[in-house]
Image (cartoon, rainbow, N blue to C red):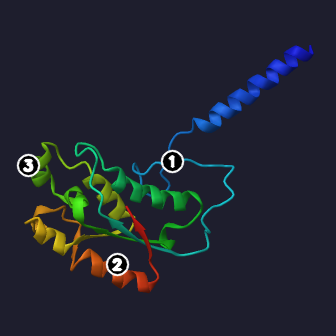
């Protein structure tokens, strides 16, 4: 009897353990991108009463240009992580300045197709980010250095004078800087 009870308890514990670790991804704010998981044992969580002002310095290019860049998806993850912790969407202010090797993630499908032989997989992520209020900017200096114009890009992006001046403009305004 004791052995049967012990085996039952071990079985229940194993089921609970596996179900905890085999959760499906959640998308509380940015739908379909930036999937995240609840961590019930986490003791450090975002403060749901704060307003988060975040400036993402996105300069890392995609590892595989035929797939969504993990760095672009990471912006959605960051927003979703705050949302899962109870921070309201309106309290998450995100600006993204794209430059360097990441600039190609912003190409429109025609130009992306010409370079990488597929439609730009990042466009849908940028559209989802914009839908939830993220401000997506591209460094004008990076555009010129690569002989690109705004018409070569996804139409939802704004052109900034430079990534450097965008950073020096928003950090003093209380935006925290994240480098991807």
Please give the residue where the numbered disc 3 appears in the rendered image.
Answer: 114
Seen from the viewer's position, the closer of residues 163 and 26 is: 163
Mark 3 or mark 1, whichever is nearer to me: 3
Q: Along the horizontal axis of the image, is 107 left or right of 52? A: left
Which type of secondary structure does the marked residue at label 1 adopt? loop
SS for dot 3: helix
Q: Is residue 76 above or below residue 49?
A: above
| Comes first in the chain, label 3 or label 1 | 1
Cα distance between the residues tagged 1 and 2: 31 Å
Q: Position of residue 164 (x, y in %)?
A: 28, 78
Residues at discs 1 and 2 in contact (Cβ within 8 Å): no
Q: Quadrant of residue 142?
A: bottom left
Which numbered disc flags the more N-terminal residue, 1 or 2? 1
Does residue 168 appear left or right of residue 100 in this picture? right
User: What residue sits 60% from the left and 65% below the top?
Assistant: 46
The reply to whether dot 3 and dot 2 touch (C-beta < 8 Å) is no
State the residue at coordinates (42%, 86%).
Answer: 172
Which corner quadrant of the image does residue 3 belong to?
top right
Task: Indicate which label's residue lies in the foreground, 3 or 2.
Answer: 2
Instruction: Name the quadrant containing residue 158.
Output: bottom left
Q: x, y percentage for residue 32?
A: 40, 48
Q: Residue at x 68, y 33 (%)?
A: 17
In front of the other: 36 or 100: 100
Local crowd at mark 3 within 10 Å, few (<14), some, or many (≥20)?
A: few
Quadrant showing the C terminus? bottom left
Q: Which residue is mark 1?
A: 26
Query: Mark 1, mark 2: which one is toward the viewer?
Result: 2
Q: Which residue bears the numbered disc 2?
A: 167
Query: Quick check: 67 above or below 149?
Result: above
On the rendered structure, is 130 left or right of 52? Answer: left
């Amino acid at each position: 009897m004791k052995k049967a009870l012990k085996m039952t308890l071990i079985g229940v514990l194993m089921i609970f353990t596996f179900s905890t670790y085999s959760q499906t991804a959640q998308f509380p704010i940015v739908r379909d991108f930036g999937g995240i998981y609840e961590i019930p044992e986490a003791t450090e969580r975002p403060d749901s009463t704060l307003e988060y002002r975040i400036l993402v310095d996105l300069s890392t290019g995609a590892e595989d240009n035929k797939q969504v860049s993990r760095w672009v998806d990471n912006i959605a993850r960051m927003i979703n992580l705050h949302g899962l912790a109870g921070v309201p969407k309106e309290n998450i202010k995100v600006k993204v300045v794209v430059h360097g090797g990441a600039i190609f993630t912003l190409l429109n499908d025609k130009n992306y197709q010409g370079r990488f032989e597929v439609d730009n997989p990042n466009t849908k992520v940028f559209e989802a980010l914009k839908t939830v209020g993220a401000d997506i900017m591209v460094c004008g200096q990076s555009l010129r250095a690569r002989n690109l114009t705004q018409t070569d890009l996804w139409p939802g992006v704004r052109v900034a004078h430079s990534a450097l001046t965008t950073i020096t403009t928003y950090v003093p305004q209380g935006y925290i800087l994240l480098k991807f």
